[in-house]
Image (spheres, rainbow, N blue to C red):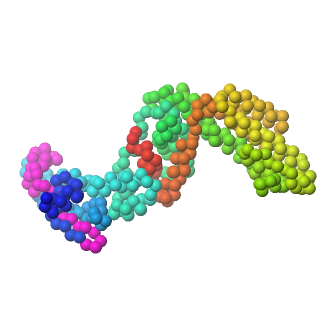
C-alpha cells in the first residue's frame, strides 16, 4: 500500500484523495480532494461532469497522532450544460456550512453526553463553542409518541427559557428520563399529555404532595394509581416539628452521646437519655413533658412508615392520628392535616413499591450539569443536554 493510500485509510473517508501532507509542531495539514465523477444537476436532473471552478474550503478533523488535523478541501463546482446551474460536488465527510467533519460532530455528540461545559468540549475537539452549539441544535428533540406504564412528576429549578422552574417527567419502572417540560404550570403539563393516544394505559403516577400534579393525573390519566413518594411523607412530618414549637425553645441538657434533645427527638432509633443536667431540667419541666410526647409521636409515625403492607399501614396511621388528637400538640397540626388529606395516595405507596428516588437523582444530576455549563438561556438546548447526559436520549 502506498503512503497516499495509507493516509487515506487513516482518514476513513470514502472517495477522499490526499494530495499533500504537511506536519508542523502544532498541527497536521492535509490537502485533499474528492474523486472526479459524474453528478446529477440539482435543477434539471441532467448528468454532467463539466467542472466550473475549484474552491478551497478549510475543515477541522479529529486529532491524528496527538495533533489537531486541518483539512484543506479543494472542492469542485460543476456546471450543467443544459440549464447552466452551478453546484458543488457531493461529499460524505462534511455538511453544508459546517467547519468540521461529520466524525468530529459525532465526537461532539458523545462528549455532550458527559456533564462538561461546551467550552471544554470545543477544546477537546479543536472546534469552537458556536460549533458545539450548532451540533446540539441539530440534534433531534422530538416528543415521545407513547406514554410508559408508570410516570413520575417533579419540578426543579432550571432558570432557563424565561422560567424559574422546569418539570421533569420520568419513567420510574425503566429508570429513564421520559421528557423535560419548559415550566411546571398545569396548562403546560395538560397540553403535553393531551395528544398521547394511550393515556388510559398508564397504571402508576408517582409524585410529591403537589395538588396541581394530582389534579392533572386524575383528569388525564384516569386509570393510574396515584402514589405519594414515601420520602416526601417522612420529610413533611419531620421537618415541620424539627424547627417549630417545642424544639425551637431553649436547648435542653445534653444526653449521653453529646447530642442535644432537639436533635435526639428526630433521631433513630435510640431514646434520648435525660439523666444529666437535673438542675437545669427542673426549670424546663413543662417543655420536657412536651418533648417526650413529641418523641413518642415521632416514633409512632416511624412505626407507621415501617408497615409491611397497606392494611397494617392503615391501622398504624389511625393509631397515630388518634394519638395526635389526644396529645393535642399544635406543632403536629399541619402534619396531621397533610396525612388526612393525602391518606389514600400515601397508602398506595404500601401496595406499589414505587418512589421518586430515581427522579430526585436526576434532579441532582441536572443541577451538576447546569452548574458546569454556567446555566442555559435556551430551553431547547437545556432539554437536549439533559436527555443526552442522562442516557435516555435519543432512544425514544
Q: Work out which residue is located at the far bottom of the displayed protein and give it.
A: 25
> How far from the left and from the top, in percent, is residue 32?
18, 61
Q: Residue at x 62, y 36 (%)?
A: 228
Front in this rendered view, residue 332 or 265: 265
Q: Residue 205: in sight, yes or no?
A: yes
**Within the magenta stretch, is there residue 26?**
yes
Left or right placement of residue 283 versus residue 160 in this view: right
Residue 221 vertical placement versus 62 (above, below): above
Q: How many marks?
A: 0
**Within the magenta stretch, is there residue 128?**
no
The N terminus - image quarter = bottom left
Q: Residue 187: in sight, yes or no?
A: no
> How far from the left and from the top, in percent, is residue 48?
9, 50
Left or right placement of residue 159 versus residue 126 in this view: right
> How far from the left and from the top, in percent, is residue 353?
58, 34
Q: Residue at x 55, y 39 (%)?
A: 153
Front in this rendered view, residue 7 or 130: 7
Q: Residue at x 54, y 50 (%)?
A: 364
Residue 22 vertical placement versus 358 (above, below): below
> How far from the left and from the top, in percent, is residue 283?
91, 53
Magenta residue span: 24-51
Residue 73 quadrant: bottom left
Amino acid at each position: 500500500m502506498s503512503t497516499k493510500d495509507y493516509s487515506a485509510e487513516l482518514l476513513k473517508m470514502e472517495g477522499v484523495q490526499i494530495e499533500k501532507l504537511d506536519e508542523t509542531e502544532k498541527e497536521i495539514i492535509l490537502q485533499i480532494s474528492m474523486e472526479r465523477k459524474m453528478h446529477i444537476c440539482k435543477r434539471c436532473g441532467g448528468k454532467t461532469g463539466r467542472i466550473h471552478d475549484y474552491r478551497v474550503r478549510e475543515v477541522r478533523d479529529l486529532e491524528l497522532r496527538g495533533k489537531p488535523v486541518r483539512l484543506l478541501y479543494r472542492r469542485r463546482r460543476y456546471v450543467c450544460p443544459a440549464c447552466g446551474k452551478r453546484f458543488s460536488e457531493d461529499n460524505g465527510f462534511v455538511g453544508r456550512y459546517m467547519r468540521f467533519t461529520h466524525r468530529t460532530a459525532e465526537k461532539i455528540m458523545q462528549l455532550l453526553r458527559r456533564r462538561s461545559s461546551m467550552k471544554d468540549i470545543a477544546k477537546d475537539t479543536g472546534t469552537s463553542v458556536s460549533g458545539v452549539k450548532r451540533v446540539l441544535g441539530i440534534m433531534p428533540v422530538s416528543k415521545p409518541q407513547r406514554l410508559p406504564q408508570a410516570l413520575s412528576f417533579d419540578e426543579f429549578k432550571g432558570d432557563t427559557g424565561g422560567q424559574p422552574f422546569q418539570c421533569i417527567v420520568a419513567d420510574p419502572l425503566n429508570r429513564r428520563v421520559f421528557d423535560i417540560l419548559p415550566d411546571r404550570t398545569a396548562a403546560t403539563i395538560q397540553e403535553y399529555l393531551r395528544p398521547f393516544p394511550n393515556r388510559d394505559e398508564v397504571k402508576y403516577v408517582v409524585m410529591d404532595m403537589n395538588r396541581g400534579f394530582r389534579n392533572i393525573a386524575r383528569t388525564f390519566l384516569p386509570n393510574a394509581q396515584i402514589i405519594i413518594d414515601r420520602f416526601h411523607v417522612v420529610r413533611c412530618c419531620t421537618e415541620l416539628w424539627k424547627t417549630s414549637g417545642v424544639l425551637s425553645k431553649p436547648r435542653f441538657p445534653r444526653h449521653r452521646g453529646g447530642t442535644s434533645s432537639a436533635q435526639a427527638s428526630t433521631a433513630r432509633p435510640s431514646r434520648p437519655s435525660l439523666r444529666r443536667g437535673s438542675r437545669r431540667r427542673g426549670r424546663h419541666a413543662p417543655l420536657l413533658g412536651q418533648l417526650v410526647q413529641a418523641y413518642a409521636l415521632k416514633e409512632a409515625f416511624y412505626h407507621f412508615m415501617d408497615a409491611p403492607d397497606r392494611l397494617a399501614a392503615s391501622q398504624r396511621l389511625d393509631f397515630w392520628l388518634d394519638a395526635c388528637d389526644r396529645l393535642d400538640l399544635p406543632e403536629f397540626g399541619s402534619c396531621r392535616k397533610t396525612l388526612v388529606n393525602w391518606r389514600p395516595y400515601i397508602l398506595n405507596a404500601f401496595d406499589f413499591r414505587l418512589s421518586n428516588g430515581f427522579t430526585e437523582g436526576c434532579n441532582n444530576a441536572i443541577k451538576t450539569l447546569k452548574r458546569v455549563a454556567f446555566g442555559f438561556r435556551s430551553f431547547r438546548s437545556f432539554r437536549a443536554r439533559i436527555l443526552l447526559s442522562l442516557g435516555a436520549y435519543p432512544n425514544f
